[in-house]
Image: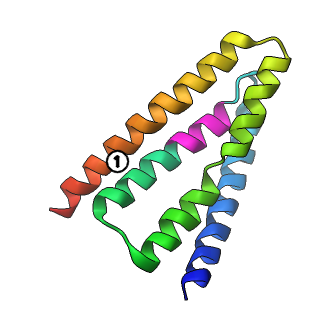
Amino acid sequence: MSVLMLVLGGSCGAVARHSLGVLMLRREKHAFPFGTLFINLLGSLLLGVLSGLGFGGNWYLLLGDGFCGAFTTFSTFSLETVQLLRGHARRKAVLYLAVSLVFGVLLFAAGDQAGRLLRR
């Protein structure tokens, strides 16, 4: 049952990430990876809410590890950072790193707090 929940959540998360990424790429005209940044920050917020709500067991496997794990992407974040560096866009690369890490943690914490308030 655990593996099924993980596979189901991961499949949905991957489809959601791809669909949102395609939608954002159609509108994106910048050399900055706004699509991946938005998806990763949204995923951090969602995972924080799940944490704050106290999801565990199969629900966490479905929504946390499964959906959020497949929705967010460290590998694409890494690739885009290296591409910015290779393209001599060092300031953009540093900004991307800083915003992703700082706001990812802040949004997780905000989501966790919101989930705890909703749980009361």
Residue 41, placed above or below residue 72: above
Pick the residue in front: 30 or 76.
76
Task: Determine the image quadrant of residue 35.
Answer: top right
Q: Residues within 10 Å of mark 1 (few under 14, many from 20)?
A: many
Total numbered labels? 1
The magenta-colored residue range is 34-41
Q: Residue furthest left?
A: 120
User: Residue placed at 59% from the left, 44% from the top?
Assistant: 39
Badge 1 is on which residue? 111
Residue 43: percent from the left, percent from the top?
52, 49
Residue 112, placed above or below residue 110: below
Q: In terms of secondary structure, what is the magenta stretch mainly?
A: helix
Element at badge 1? helix
Pick the residue in front: 103 or 3.
3
Quarter of the rendering occupied by the N terminus: bottom right
User: Residue placed at 82% from the left, 26% from the top?
Assistant: 83
Task: Determine the image quadrant of residue 11.
Answer: bottom right
User: Residue placed at 55% from the left, 58% from the top?
Assistant: 68
Residue 38, placed above or below residue 81: below
Residue 60: percent from the left, percent from the top?
44, 70
Please state if 66 lies on the left or on the right of 115 as rendered.
right
38 is within the stretch colored magenta? yes
User: Residue placed at 75% from the left, 46% from the top?
Assistant: 22
Q: Residue furthest right?
A: 86
Please state if 54 lies on the left or on the right of 104 as rendered.
left
9 is within the stretch colored magenta? no
Which residue type does callout 1 highlight? Gly
